[in-house]
Amino acid sequence: MELSPKQQISELIKSSNNILLVTHESPDSDGVGGMIALSLVLEKLGKKTTMIAPGFDDDYHHFLPSSDKVMPSLVNSKDFVISLDITNTKVEKILYKRIDNDRLDIIVTPGNGSQINQDEIKFSSAGYGWDLIIVLDCATLERTGSVQESEPALFYEKPIINIDHHAGNDFFGKVNLVEITATSTSEVLVPLIESLGRENNLIDENVATCLLTGIMGDTSSFQNSNTTPKSLTVAAQLVAAGARQQEIVRNLFKTKSLSTLKLWGKALAKLQEESDEKFVWSALTKEEIDSTGAKPEQTGGLIDELLKTASGVDFALLISERNGAVHGSLRAVSKSIDVSIIAALFDGGGHAAASAFDIPNSTLSDQQQNIIFKIKQYQAKRLQA
Ligand SMILES: [Mn+2]
């Protein structure tokens, strides 16, 4: 009988010792919470883990246990190997000498009057030592951003487990646990973790807190239209397991830095309602974001703030300039709309309830009119039908 993805994951984990966990760029509560939860569980099972969340640097997730172990990029910790072909050379002595603290000389003394030629010396990297990679909350490997860019070979060398809930997931893993009806990757992780060890209680207070953080992040604390009965059941189970729900609410939704409030103020002041086409939108230039002292990632929670202002509309849109691109973020208010279709108008994607797109190498002044025009056209047609 063929093993289910969950069983295959369990087998792969059993046979691995040193596991790399990666989530997406501009990591959110689901990516970070899910990743830390799984790492805590794997460590309990005696595994060594490394966590990478590209660009991780925010004030919201520091309350999570072990968040200080999340690295913002792939640290170049590969061993560097200098190898010498000794078929024709005898080596009598090797020593190294440190010169002025900024140079290291490795001195190889040949024996029996032999000589070392430069072409007998080779340099290479010895690899990172991970035997398994688990990618979380990423529809494609490209979502791991700088990790894939800096070390594309890494993903060919080792087996990948792909755990996600995005409809557009392209099944890049050796094993793919993709559940598109789940609110979040953290929700997908709950039954997986349970299956990893039935005897020992793997979902302790810390693990439950991380998982609930992920679910609450992706549903905006159960406010979004993507909230399902199942997600509420899982959340109740996590609270029963000791998840510190009040702490999550305080950190994710109530504690806002001054820069975030300024950023929200700017976006709310520019909020526009297209009442005929039933959506609200706002736009922020790079200068506007910079002037508040906020980082581009802080626009993440802002779209949910726009939602609260939006009654009687189908969706909210936030356009912002991010890393040389124009980034659009969409959230459905009404259950009747699939915002991933709108994101697809600009080659983006996501879920029916939450989607995004990027228009590379462009500015708001180039794109804003066109974006709004296209969306209005789409909505006008849709609402007529
Ligand atoms: Mn997610």
Image: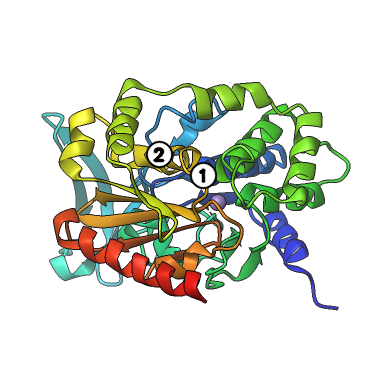
Q: Is residue 133 left or right of residue 53?
A: right
Name the foreground residue: 114 vs 38: 38
> Where's residue 233, x and y in %?
80, 43
Respond yes or no on whether mark 1 lies under 8 Å from ligand 1: no
Q: Is residue 269 above or below residue 34?
A: above
* Extreme residue toward the left, this view: 100
| Quadrant of the rendered image containing residue 297 | top left
In the foreground, 253 or 21: 253
* The residue carrying mark 2 has its beta carbon less than 8 Å from ligand 1: no
Its colouring scheme is rainbow
Amino acid carrying mark 1 in the image:
Ser
- Dot 2 lies on which element? helix
Q: Quadrant of residue 33?
A: top right
Name the residue rendered at 48%, 51% in the picture: 23
Q: Is residue 129 visible?
A: no
Label 1 sits on residue: 311
**Is residue 118 visible from the viewing direction of this image?**
yes
Q: Amino acid at mark 2?
A: Leu
What residue sits right under mark 2 in the picture?
302
Distance, label 2 to label 1, CA atoms, is 16 Å
Q: Quadrant of residue 359?
A: bottom left
Image location (x, y in percent) of residue 282: 31, 46
Numbered disc in front, either 2 or 1? 1
Q: Residue at x 51, y 23 (%)?
A: 254
Mark 2 vs 1, N-terminal side: 2
210 with respect to 196 (left or right): left
What secondary structure is marked by label 1? loop
